[in-house]
Image (tube, coloured by chain):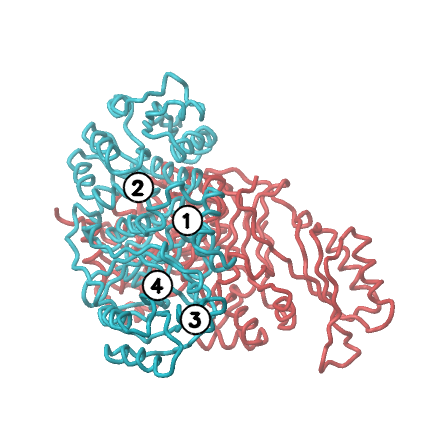
Chain colours: A red, B cyan
Amino acid sequence: MADTVVQVGLIGCGTVGGGVVELLRAEGDAIARKTGVRLEIARVADKDVAQAERVGVAADRITNDAAAVINDPRIPIIVELVGGTTVAKEFVLAALRAGKHVVTANKALLAKFGKEIYRTARENKRCVAFEASCAGGIPVILALRNGLIANRVSAIYGIMNGTCNYILSEMADQGKSYQEALTEAQRLGFAEVDPTLDVNGTDTAHKLAVLASIAFCADVDFSRLHIEGIEGLDAQDIAAGRELGYVCKLLGIADRTPDGLSLRVHPAFVPRTHPLASNSGSFNAVSIYGNWVGHTLYYGRGAGRKPTASAVVADLVDIAVGNGVRTFEAFHMLADQSPEPRYTPMDRLESRYYVRLMAVDRPGVMAQITRAFGEHEISLRAVTQHESPGRPADDGVPVVVLTHVAREGRMREALDQIARLPVVKARPVMIRLVEEHEEYAA
Amino acid sequence: MADTVVQVGLIGCGTVGGGVVELLRAEGDAIARKTGVRLEIARVADKDVAQAERVGVAADRITNDAAAVINDPRIPIIVELVGGTTVAKEFVLAALRAGKHVVTANKALLAKFGKEIYRTARENKRCVAFEASCAGGIPVILALRNGLIANRVSAIYGIMNGTCNYILSEMADQGKSYQEALTEAQRLGFAEVDPTLDVNGTDTAHKLAVLASIAFCADVDFSRLHIEGIEGLDAQDIAAGRELGYVCKLLGIADRTPDGLSLRVHPAFVPRTHPLASNSGSFNAVSIYGNWVGHTLYYGRGAGRKPTASAVVADLVDIAVGNGVRTFEAFHMLADQSPEPRYTPMDRLESRYYVRLMAVDRPGVMAQITRAFGEHEISLRAVTQHESPGRPADDGVPVVVLTHVAREGRMREALDQIARLPVVKARPVMIRLVEEHEEYAA
């Protein structure tokens, strides 16, 4: 049987776009043998045409005008790899209105404008596929939407930013400061020149919003996510946590609570035996808990030219064989067809906490501190006063507190009160302790 | 839009079949909301009709005659959960010939008769779906076939039998003997009353054959797999490996070598930092290495009523929305459309080895042993003679050898020679050392 040839238009020929060009050149024959579909890059748009030339796209297929690709009548599928939420949004909407399917790796776009994009696709009887937007090469959207379709999902826990995970691994294993680890990550290419969206948690939050929207069939409002990054972390806390048996990870967490859906990104101490604890370096890992399948975990490279290209091409094949549109039409799990969820206010979160504060080393100080916790109904599991060699005594000495489960609102109040104590030298540091999620949660 | 109602016929209402009935009862509404498809169990066949009654199937839907379900004209999809390769094969072929799609969890059937079954499906323009056959609830076939479609797979490494993994974890962590750990596994329901096919590696091999066939687009001949189980393992070797930094796992391995495709199941020592080392207890984990995506790993419950039912229902939904047939027809990755592979003879495998032998404690003995290795061009990385408290001296003392990479054929010859030495008291124990697979292998 002759292969079906499907022409693809590519907008954005940077790292991932170039990877897609290279992948289809190297594997086009193998993919055609396996699927009966031959994917051809008909046209590439990039404002820097040299990028496309560099990966060997023929000059007559390169343009700096995205509209020329979008409106090319030979092309039924557009791949958007521009990134960002301005022109990328215009390109995606224009492509859908021109009757093209869209494949994108743009998590920011989907997290913020998914609803409008999915709706536009539906109005035009086309589909949007976005496996590459979450956790790079790991087929986690496929698993969540298709593989676990029989399940009600109770929670997602993900390490979804390799930059942060690399930095935290270096801080823990090599004793580096945040700044040293970041500089090293930049040197090795694991961190962007401007790493802001990675280290401040935004990138993880974009992915969490996309995954949670599918998992909970919810029209997630990105502005309702609680987001904390890793920029403020101090190596002494990573080390103290390690001594206590914990590993620090930047987690994206989505789970059902009695108060609604809780969506949050923050550094967390997980016990050394936690399923996500051993995920170190630049790898991603996503745990999904379903009420029938129990705990499943997906691990792999969450970013990078080759893994992300792998996910983009999987979506292209899925659309080219005809399954992509059918899935998009049959399944009602995206933001444009889902209700707004009720959100759990962060103050109502129940968690255990690690708190480190710098206190004057004087009799009665510990009593003042523990009293402040007690007044907010927070019971303590362990309190230790550490030696602080090399620091001037008037910075205070570090006191590390591990609490039992407490409500976040009360914890904030307690920390506010403690911060105001004259014997406490600086704003206390608080890091949440995250235990393994109950496998079959209610 | 009204739901599409799809009638399902179920043959076999034991553990997993009962789970499917319960899942569809509990989640039918939720699945219909998400997918537009309402799956109804129209009819259930089991030779023990009480099994179906026990999970609440209405009496008029139960029969002990599989043919009555297969030939029911209302039913387009048959779920085969009988197991085994005798009547199950008849039922599956009859269902396909009657124009029904088939969903099965039957790894033995597919490993041995996949080619005939897929061909029969194709002749009748129907499909066979079998996500539940490998690694239970983990959507690993979906990942391999769809998610990683852009990749050439270089290797699969899997822990795919929870019984064995539980037994090995107990032997390592609790110091139990094989028999003690097996008895405990049976008591807890992690092992069958007759655990033969689990502990002798056959079950793992069935799954490996199914996965490898897809991954390498090969018509795998099950009889060509090299299979060793865990029954012969001695707690003293597990303990000695542990001291050396290794964890013992029963691995199913499929990888390309210069000599062809190597398919093997055997106990292996993996370094404590190996991606599969931390997978303990009854969980499964499968690593897949693709030439674009790099290393990906899938983890979860590989067996059991609820996880397996989750996978069966995912296949049912996929078929019901129309994607299942399309994938089956468009993709040419199954045994009936693939060439026979060239197999790497086990003797040509290159590996490192752990060897433990019981030798007379006398001057010159070590020289004889190390000379035997040397004569077969096997170089040693470490040789240690252990104390053996509590054993009579004439059993010999344990000598543990770790080799560098050597060819398996030479290792066999060396062990034969060593076994014949008068100073060696018993057949040496050999366990392969498996390092982490190179992420981007050639």
Kindly identify the amino acid type of the residue bearing the numbered disc 2.
Answer: Phe
* Residue on which the image places disc 4: B294
Q: Are marks 3 and 4 on the same chain?
A: yes
* Quadrant of residue A232 within the rendered picture: bottom right
Give the mark nearest the N terminus, 3 or 4. 4
Question: The residue marked by circle 4 belongs to what chain?
Answer: B
Neighbour tally class for label 4: few under 14, some 14-19, many 20 plus, Cα within 10 Å: many
Kindly identify the amino acid type of the residue bearing the numbered disc 1.
Answer: Thr
Q: Residue furthest top?
A: B60
Does residue B27 sit above or below A99 in this rendering? above
Kindly identify the amino acid type of the residue bearing the numbered disc 4.
Answer: Gly
* Residue on which the image places disc 3: B393
Q: Are marks 2 and 3 in contact (CB under 8 Å)?
A: no
Give the mark nearest the N terminus, 1 or 2. 2
Q: Of the residues tagged 1 and 2, which is closer to the observer?
A: 1
Does residue B161 sit above or below B51 in this rendering? below
Kindly identify the amino acid type of the residue bearing the numbered disc 3.
Answer: Ala
A409 relative position to B83: left or right:
right
Report the Cα–Cα distance between label 1 and label 2: 21 Å
Question: The residue marked by circle 1 belongs to what chain?
Answer: B
Give the mark nearest the N terminus, 2 or 3. 2
